[in-house]
Image (tube, helix red, strand yellow):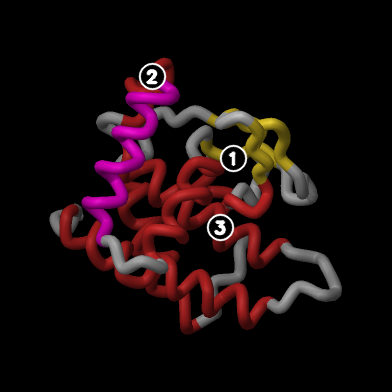
Amino acid sequence: NFISNFKDINIENNLNSEIVLINLKILKKYKHLKVRESLTHGDLKFDHISILNNKIEYVIDWENVGIRSIFFDLLNLFIPWFVHRSFNFIIIKNYVIRFIKRYLPNLLKDILKKYDIYFCLFALERFKRINEARSIKFDKNSANQRYNFIFKNLTKEIYREHKNI
């Protein structure tokens, strides 16, 4: 469903069209696999989490809440942080899987053989969110530049792993 619904999204943005097309191509290869969806925060980042006594006390800024792939918030929390520190796709993937194994073990079976699929969904869901933004103060050009910075190299790396598509 996600792939067919994605056709309506404007991908004329030259800066990110290659990223979007590669992620769509990878997902089409695995369209027979099922992924889980969940209600997600939509903009989870460290700035939106309040921690007290080493536990999450509350999460703020729920304006982007919606139904997305189950790992959207987790990937949104970690991937930009790692990319800004020049980590590559494999290192990030291994970290996220270790995190899930330690803190979300009930979701481990969902990610082990499908991480790349959830990553591609995450990349496309982020792009979709940029295109659906309706706020007057939302700067779409800056958002597209941030998107490109986060996903350009990671998409190249995942594409190399899935070259035989």
The tag earlier along the polypeptide, 1 or 2, is 1
Compared with 110, 140 (above or below) is below
**Mark 2 or mark 3, whichever is nearer to me:** 2
Task: Choose top left, top right, bottom left or bottom right for residue 108.
Answer: top left
Single out the residue that lies furthest toward the front.
53
Q: Report crowding for label 2: few under 14, some 14 to 19, many 20 or more residues within 10 A (C-alpha).
A: few
**Residue at image point 38% right, 29% down:** 100
The tag earlier along the polypeptide, 2 or 3, is 2
- Can residue 53 be found in the magenta stretch? no
Q: Which residue is mark 1?
A: 68
**Residue at image point 75% right, 44% down:** 60
Compared with 57, 95 (above or below) is below
Q: Which residue is mark 2?
A: 105
The tag earlier along the polypeptide, 1 or 3, is 1
Q: What amino acid type should be assigned to the residue bearing mark 2?
A: Pro
* Highlighted magenta segment, given as a residue range: 88-104
